[in-house]
Amino acid sequence: MNAHDAVPDDVRTAYEAACTRLLSLQSDDGSWEGEMEWNTTILSQYVIVLRVLQRPPDEGSRQGMVTHFRNTRTPEGGWGMHPAAPPSPYATLLAYVALRLLGLGPGDPLTAGARKWLGTQPGGARCVPQWGRFWLAVLGIVPYREVAPFPPEAMLLPRWFPLHPERLLGWTRMLYQAMSYLYGARFRADLGPLADALRRELFATPATPSAPGPDVVFPRGRLLRALQQCLRGWERVHSRRLRRAALERCHHAVVDEQYASPVHGLSSVNALMECLVLFAHDRRHPMLDAAVARLEYWRWADEKNGVRICGERSLVWDTTFAVQALLAAGPQHRSEQAASALHKACTYLRAARITTYPGLNPPLRKVIGGWAFSDGDSRWPVGDCTAEAVDALLGARDALGSGAGPAGTDGPLPPRSLSGALDVILDRQNRDGGFGTLDRQRTGRWLDVLNPTEMFAQCMVDSSSVDCTGSALTALARMRGLLPPRERRRADAAIRRGATYLRSAQNPDGSFAGTWGINYTYAAFHAARGLRAAGAPPDDPALRLLGHWLTATQLADGGWGEDWRGCVEQRYIALGHALPEMTSWAVLAGLDTLGPGSPSVAAGVRWLCTAQEADGSWSDDHVNAVFFATMMINYRLYAAYFPTLALGRYLRAVTPITPRGAA
């Protein structure tokens, strides 16, 4: 059966239902946002910080937090690092401590079950990675000598030095300057008798040598162990005067971030650490009250799952893809309600563009003219978020005309705004031609060898990724025709270099490895759209090879599904059943490689139509994204807008474009 003959009616019905569902999820301000479901570790850290700051939650919040811990506990009695994971010593240890701080006794079913499970692990609570030990040291439960050294003196190194913190990835750099202050000051909270009780409960058995626990995915290598041994020696002989200067440098860096991000921090983890630094520096610090108040931004609550703290907010990111999904099928499939929603969304995205930087010191990267992942109050623009916002706004401009913007403007994105967006995107292009996120790569990947976290990978430098590069090339290709000649030449050169990077990143079997989504399927979507945007025809050898890989990995049910474990093991692992996001990414990549007439693409589309619920939704209870290679996330709205986008683009590809209302 030819895909052009019988499928479009089914696809049209499914697409219209998906659009109706998507429209129902739009907020009054024009944005979309779904919860980024992760794990309980940030909630645990939030509870710890409130206790250290002597600002206990109100009773309603306390009950909501306990509810969330209860609802997310695994059958074994612990807590996992993501919704699909087995129990984690790190997450379980922090949850146990947080529950005790919330007033639960050691005999409560939640705490007793957690302690029992920890006791089954080799070494018990001692098997937690270094980040767990750091929090125990902050609480005064273990001495700082058991924590990997975070010397603040690194902040005093010359900026050209290879180990200067400025060379780190932005998230890591901000954490380092806060953690190193707490480590260097040997800050310890006063829990009173509870500290001794926790010490007895968690370390009831004598210490014995044990293998690294299951959270230690990347054990410390010989070079890192040698460096840490030297740093421990430094802790015994360092100059007190130099230590005071280093601590003050860390404190100033935290204060600068408070000014640079006056509404909320870079992430919830960073914001929590910075509160501790301000408190450790001065319990009556003039910025502390505002810093604590900002933590409310990261709070997520509902009656079913209680109170939790999200790792990130995704308003800009979700809104850009929702806009693209509503535009995907073309004007003949766009309702008046959708057009109105697009106008509101464009207004939101325009307002979310970063136009000021209130920090005390010049930023390390281009800021003005970009978009953050979260919202317009963030001062941390991200390369692919900026690219997707540009793509969405220019797509709306092409589809809706200048009316997509407020009266008296030049449409959703005036030409003068394109220059700022171009600068932000190009500032994230690395020497290899690929694009990063917050920063340009400032040192070699060799720095990953010195990664002290034991739990994360790819967290030391802002390396290029296929995902970010595909987004950047798509936006650059769309905006280039609107740029003046000089900037157009800059965009063209960046596109050529980016396409070269994508070709070099392709694996021999045709696949690409992802960085921010799961995993090879997500990368296929971005690689295909990026190469097509760069001018590659469908029969380009790289695209043909990617098309063969898509066909070879298609499941018997017609869809695609990828196991999250492949991110950790750095290989493709298929699931036994399809998932809506991964099927959507594969269909979108297939449209750019195999073409709309391909049986594989048609089968994927049929799976999406069949898997759709009566209300126009798809199942959204599975992990679909990743950060730092090991931390899995579930973006709740991925299952809403990516299938809509795939169905819309397929529908547009297989049906002729006719004026709406024509016979």
Image (tube, grey):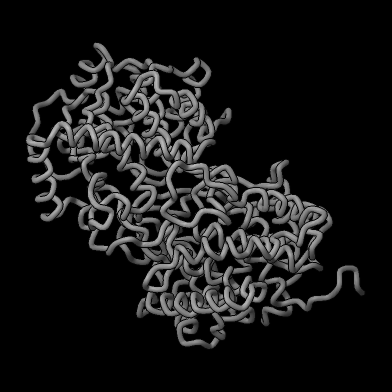
Is residue 311 visible to the viewer in this orientation of the structure?
Answer: no
**Residue at 50% across, 16% down:** 58
**Residue at 52% across, 73% down:** 530
Query: Where in the figure is residue 290, as x and y percent of width and height?
Result: 49, 27
Q: Quadrant of residue 481?
A: bottom right
Total marks placed? 0
Query: Where in the figure is residue 289, as x and y percent of width and height?
Result: 47, 23
Measured along the vertical axis of the image, is residue 301 above or below residue 511? above
Tell which residue pokes out farthest to the top in this image.
193
221 relative position to 176: left or right: left
Q: Quadrant of residue 433?
A: bottom left
**Residue at 47% across, 62% down:** 561
Measured along the vertical axis of the image, is residue 56 above or below residue 113? above
Query: Where in the figure is residue 448, as x and y percent of width and height?
Result: 25, 57
In depth, the one of 514 and 576 nearer the eye is 514
Query: Where in the figure is residue 216, as x and y percent of width and height?
Result: 23, 47
Quadrant containing the N terminus is: bottom right
Q: Quadrant of residue 222?
A: bottom left
Quadrant containing the C terminus is: bottom right
Is residue 420 visible to the viewer in this orientation of the structure?
Answer: yes
**Residue at 69% across, 76% down:** 653
In depth, the one of 438 and 358 nearer the eye is 358
569 relative position to 57: left or right: left
